[in-house]
Amino acid sequence: MTEPLSVLAIAIVCLTTLTLGALGLRLAKGTSDFYVAGRTVTPWRNASAIGGEYLSAASYLGVAGLVYDQGIDMLWMPIGYTIGYLVLLILVAAPLRRSGAYTLPDFAEARLESRALRRGCALLVVGIGWLYLLPQMQGAGLALRHVSGLPTWVGATVLTVIVVLNVAAGGMRSVTLVQSVQYWIKLTAIAVPAFVLLLVWHRSGSPTPQAPASWWEPLTSDEPTPRTLFTTYSTLAALCLGTMGLPHIAVRFYTNPDGVAARRTTVSVLALLSIFYVFPPVYGYLGRAYLDPVDTAGDPSRTVVLALPGAMLSGLDGQLLTALVAAGAFAAFLATASGVAMSVAGAIDQDVLRPLTARLTQGDATPSSSFRLAAMVGVLAPFVTAVTAEPIGISSAVGHAFAIAAATFAPLLILGVWWTRLTAKGAAAGVLVGGTTTSLAAIVSVLDLAPEGWPGALVAAPTAWATPLAVVVAIVASLLTPGSRPRRWARTMTRLHTPEDVLAEAR
């Protein structure tokens, strides 16, 4: 059934996004503007942009769906998402900003002086980005179909076109403006209906959610408890460590003026995420009282938030609330997809297109021209997959992206920032082992080839064993290859750990 108000709300969000992107185009002047917004983004604006980027479909729709489907023990999901920024704040936020790099591949080359490692990291950025983009595109198609009846490819196409236009137009300048505004759109769109629905629930006599006993008890399922406990802790580890390794998250810290601003940004992000994550579980809880399980069969993360307002309120009131949550959902898709596309485009531009274009044009190509081409190339593969393949679980796909990031970039960043004896070959070995194991686990899981019992649990949640394995391999390989230790490691480590005001006084 078509819901005109919801379609109108989505159209307004899309128009707002395009307008902000056009404003970013006027502000973007050079390479620094395209990649890191000139390194002039204030902590509060950057925190809003990170919140807009980080709160993807998995947060806006997926958390509510998981609570609805699996019970109150899924409340640890938003806790894990948020704690990831605390880990990032403590371990790498300021040194990452002081590195002077534009992207994670830049950091890898600057710290370890290896072009081969840089190319491997660029490949990982693209792979993680595609895995993150796919559910955003499919989710946009499903959300638009839910309120309009249009085929799913329409929503995916609308999302892709808007993202490419914004990223190609003004790069990080446009993306920052879009994401900082869309955080507040998403917060409003999920919070206002939640308060209204709680009031309706209270006035209707506070009906108790209908759910089996396992829904109410943490760490209970059809599986033996040890495997359930392992999966929980492994997924939490993926969320905590994967946050610092997500390319589209890490790149935002390069937009701060200095390391102090990077730390302040992270503290602000913690506050903004904490406020947002209060509300998705409300939808999952109320969904058990008002939604028909038949209507949410399959993957409830696609339907609970969108379906609940209409189920609790009839007439115009229900339509208005549905329009608001639909607008927030599309803002979530647009904000996250813009940030991911930005990181993918940066990797393709710097490590593939710009070197190739420079050779063909004798160095006359401008950075912005190759970057815009990279933005279009970077979204092509996930878009084709989104419109041709069967939808995959939003939370599942994003979870595997976190697992891959946790087993590759997280060890690289932590060891690169804090261990002076890390070598290029050691880092490459750790990244290779972590990336290979978690990627194979993701493929087996997505294709539903995982065996039963403990082997299946290890494949479904590989972070708990893949990340320590990658760290051990990186350390052992570094100790065995001292000759590949970067020559300027002392200078690099000094830059990473010396506060900017100290450096300014030294000059």
Image (spheres, rainbow, N blue to C red):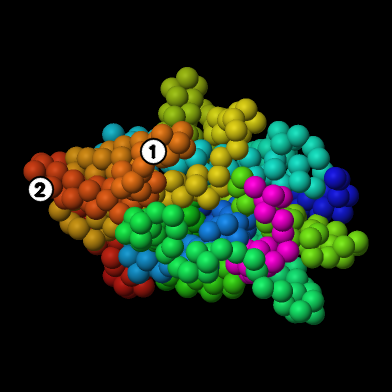
Amino acid type, mark 2: Leu
Res. 346 in view: no
Residue 36 at x, y = what percent? 51, 52
Question: Would residue 452 be visible to someone looking at this image?
Answer: yes
Q: Residue at x 44, y 46 (%)?
A: 400
The structure residue drawn at horizontal position 50% and vertical position 47%, both measured from the top left corner, is 396
- Comparing 8 with 45, the one in front is 8
Nearer the viewer's eye, disc 2 or disc 1? Answer: 1
Residue 370 located left or right of residue 295: left
Residue 450 tag number:
1
* Residue 349 drawn above or below residue 421: above
Disc 1 crowd rating (10 Å Cα; few below 14, some 14-19, many 20+) is some
Does 287 lie within the magenta span? yes
Relative vertical location of residue 6 with respect to residue 139 in this rendering, above or below: below
Quadrant of the snapshot with the N terminus: top right
Q: Position of residue 280 (x, y in %)?
A: 62, 65
The C terminus appears in which quarter of the rendering? Answer: bottom left
For badge 1, the amino acid type reads Ala
Task: Tell me the chief SS of the magenta region.
Answer: helix
Q: Quadrant of residue 116?
A: top left
Where does the image place residue 249, in percent across and percent down from the top left?
A: 48, 54
Q: Picture coordinates of residue 298 (x, y %)?
A: 61, 45
Magenta region: 279-297
Compared across the picture, whether 42 is left or right of 183 comes to left
Residue that badge 2 annotates: 479
